[in-house]
Image (cartoon, rainbow, N blue to C red):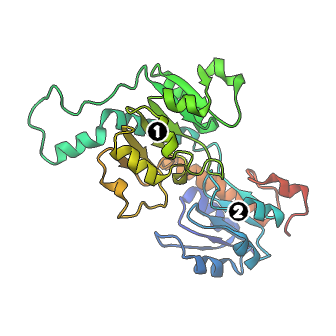
Amino acid sequence: MKPKVFVSRLIPDEGLNLVLDACDAEVWQDELPPPREILLEKIRDKVGLLSLLTDKIDAELMDMNPQLRVVSNYAVGFDNVDIPAATARGLPIGNTPGVLTDTTADFAFTLLMSAARRVVEGADYVRAGKWKTWGPKLLMGVDVHGATLGLVGFGRIGQAMAKRASGFDMRVLYYDQYRRADLEQSMGVMYADMDTLLRESDFISIHTDLNATTRHMFNADAFSKMKASAILVNTARGPVIDHAALYDALSSGKIRVAALDVTEPEPIPMDSPLRTLPNCLVVPHIASATIATRGKMAEMAAKNLIAGVNGERLPTPVNPEVYDKEMRK
Ligand code: DGY
C-alpha cells in the first residue's frame, strides 16, 4: 500500500507527478489554502504533509497525528513551521534551499531598478493616456550605478544580490549576524554594523530570515537613520518591517520609496494605507515565481516528502538534529 499524504495546494507537475506516483495523495485543489480546521482534518489519516508557507504547522497539528512522519514545506523559508516543536517530536521538516536563490535575487534587483527608475509609474502613466510629449522633467528617478547598496542578511540570496550589484558598479555593504570575512575581498563587499548600513545606503535590500531578532527590525528608529533618498526593497518576509512605521516614513518623506514583495499580513489588507501611497510598490510574493524555479522547488519538496514517508533521511532537512534521535516510524 502506498503511503497516504496530503498536499495542501496544486504544485507544479515536476513535483506533483512524483508524489502521485509514489504516494496515495490527496491534493487540495482550491486556489486558496485549506482553512485551519480542514488542514487538521485532512492530515488525520496521513503519514506525510506537503505544506506551503500559508499553512501554519504548529504543535497542535503535529500532536493531532502522531503517525505523521514528515512535513515537506514548499519554500526555502520555514517561519510558518514551529521547528523546535517538530524537533522535540522527532519530526523531520524539509525545505527547498538553493534552487530559488538566483531567481529571487533577480527579482529583488528588478524591484530595486523598478523603484529607482519609476517603471510602474511610467507604465501607469502611459496606460492612463497621460503621455503627451517628451518631458525634460518627466518621471525622473535616481541612478542605480555607482550607488551604495546595503544588504541586510548575507546568506545565499544576499550574496547573489551582491553579484548583481557589482555589475552596476555599486558599493556594497552588508550586515549579517555572521560576518563573512572570507567573501569580502572576492565579492567586493564590506561588512557594516546596522547603523552604518542604514546611514550610508542609497538602496537597502532585505534578505534575512524572520525570527525574534529580525521581526520589525525596520521600525521607526531604523527609518529615522536612513537617508531621505533611500529606497527599501523587501523580498524576505513581511514582518521584518513594521508597516505602520513604514507608512509614516514614506508619507513624511523620511525615505523615498519602498518596493515590497512580502507584507504583513499577506495578502496586504485592502484597507492598508500603504496601498494608497504612490511611493510604495507592492507585488504579491512572486520573487521565486518563474516556471523553471517553481518546478524545481516542487521536485525538491516532493523528494523530501517521499523520503520522509519511507523513513529515509530527507535530502534537505531543516532540522537534521532529528536524525540524532529515534525517527518517527
Ligand atoms: C520561500 O521559498 O521562502 C519564498 O518566500 C517563496 O518562494
Looking at the image, residue 313 sits to the left or right of residue 9; the answer is right
Look at the numbered disc 1 and say if its residue's Cβ is closer than 8 Å to ligand 1: no
Q: Where is 4 relative to 153, above or below? A: below
Tell me the residue at 62%/65% (across/down): 51
Mark 1 or 2, closer to the camera: 1
* Occupied quadrant, residue 152: top right
Q: Earlier in the sequence, mark 1 or mark 2?
A: 2
Q: Where is 193 relative to 58, above or below? A: above
Query: Which image quarter holds the C terminus?
Result: bottom right
Residue 48, x across and y down, in percent: 71, 69
Residue 11, x across and y down, in percent: 54, 61
Residue 261, numbered circle: none
Q: In what element is the residue under mark 1? A: helix
Tell me the residue at 55%/59% (across/down): 13
Residue closer to the observer: 213 or 184: 213
Q: Where is 46 relative to 293, above or below? A: below
Residue 113, x across and y down, in percent: 38, 34
Looking at the image, residue 59 sits to the left or right of residue 106; the answer is right
Residue 243 appears in the rendering = yes
Residue 274, x across and y down, in percent: 36, 54
Q: Please, what is the three-letter code of the amino acid marked with disc 1?
A: Ser
Query: Which image quarter holds the N terminus?
Result: bottom right
Task: Say which residue label 1 marks.
Answer: 224
Tell me the residue at 46%/38% (across/down): 224
Task: Say which residue label 2 marks.
Answer: 82
Q: How far apart are marks 1 and 2 (CA)?
A: 33 Å
Looking at the image, residue 77 sits to the left or right of residue 221; the answer is right
Q: In what element is the residue under mark 2? A: loop
Q: Please, what is the three-letter code of the amino acid marked with disc 2?
A: Asp
